[in-house]
Image (spheres, rainbow, N blue to C red):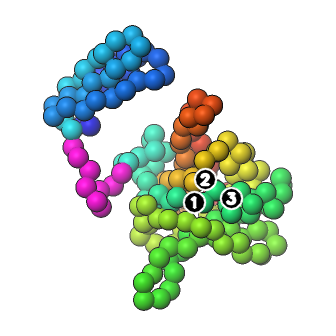
Amino acid sequence: MIAPPTAIMNALNRAGGHHIRVKFGKDRVRFLGPDGAVEVPGRVVPLRDGDAIPVSAHNHGSIFAIVQFDLEPLRSAVSDAGAHGILELHLVRSLGADPNWEAYVVNEGGERVPLQVKAVMEPERDIVGRYRAATLNAMLSLRTQKYLGLMFTGSPESPTLYADWRELDIGVDVEFLMRPLS
């Protein structure tokens, strides 16, 4: 949906509440909430395969990759690093006839722990970022579902991690931004 952001924000506020349904029309979007229905004129643009999903992560930089991680191997690797540890997160293209993306973390002892991932929006090149294990652990402790999607923003040389999701069972919205260590 392409519409003025302030019109969308005002419509969401006027519809009220946390449980707002969104209905798209050809030239408008309708927000249905506990306080009523509000329409915003705009243009609906359907996504096709290959379209970039988001353009930016709330002004934290352009998104250059989106990766879905299987949460348990990632959580295990992070917790093994300890509260004061630093981890390197690697996302690299595998070698071979049918290259895919592989991910692993490297702990301070140099141990390489493979992760299960699916690249939703593939980066143009390999990514390596260094992060505090305690901060990663705090983020992962909030996620209850099996998978976690991470967006990489900024630049591949200094990848910022961005994640946002909703925990439906407890009704909490989570937004998490983690800049890499130098």
Residue 69's tag is 1
Q: Is residue 171 left or right of residue 51?
A: right
- Asked whether 50 falls inside the magenta stretch, the response is yes
Neighbour tally class for label 1: few under 14, some 14-19, many 20 plus, Cα within 10 Å? many
Residue occupied by mark 2: 146
Q: Earlier in the sequence, mark 3 or mark 2?
A: 3
3D distance between C-alphas at marks 3 and 2: 7 Å
The residue at the point 81 percent across, 62 percent down is 80
SS type, badge 3: helix
- Decide: is 101 above or below 71: below
The image shows residue 168 at horizontal and vertical percentages of: 56, 34
Q: Name, please, the residue furthest toward the front.
A: 169
Question: Considering depth in this image, is 56 or 141 the residue closer to the camera?
Answer: 141
SS type, badge 1: strand
The image shows residue 43 at horizontal and vertical percentages of: 19, 35
Classify the position of the C terminus by image quarter. bottom right
Neighbour tally class for label 3: few under 14, some 14-19, many 20 plus, Cα within 10 Å? some
Task: Look at discs 2 and 1 and give the one toward the viewer.
Answer: 2
Q: Is residue 181 left or right of residue 68?
A: right
- Decide: is 174 above or below 129: above
The residue at the point 33 percent across, 29 percent down is 22
Q: Name, please, the residue furthest toward the top.
A: 35
- Residue stretch rendered in magenta on the structure: 45-53
Task: Look at discs 1 and 3 and give the one toward the viewer.
Answer: 3
Residue occupied by mark 3: 72
Are the residues at dot 3 and dot 2 in contact (C-beta closer than 8 Å)?
A: yes
Q: Name, please, the residue furthest toward the bottom.
A: 97
Classify the position of the N terminus by image quarter. top left
Task: Give the amino acid type for the residue marked by disc 3 in the picture.
Answer: Glu
- Asked whether 41 falls inside the magenta stretch, the response is no
3D distance between C-alphas at marks 1 and 3: 9 Å
The image shows residue 153 at horizontal and vertical percentages of: 49, 53
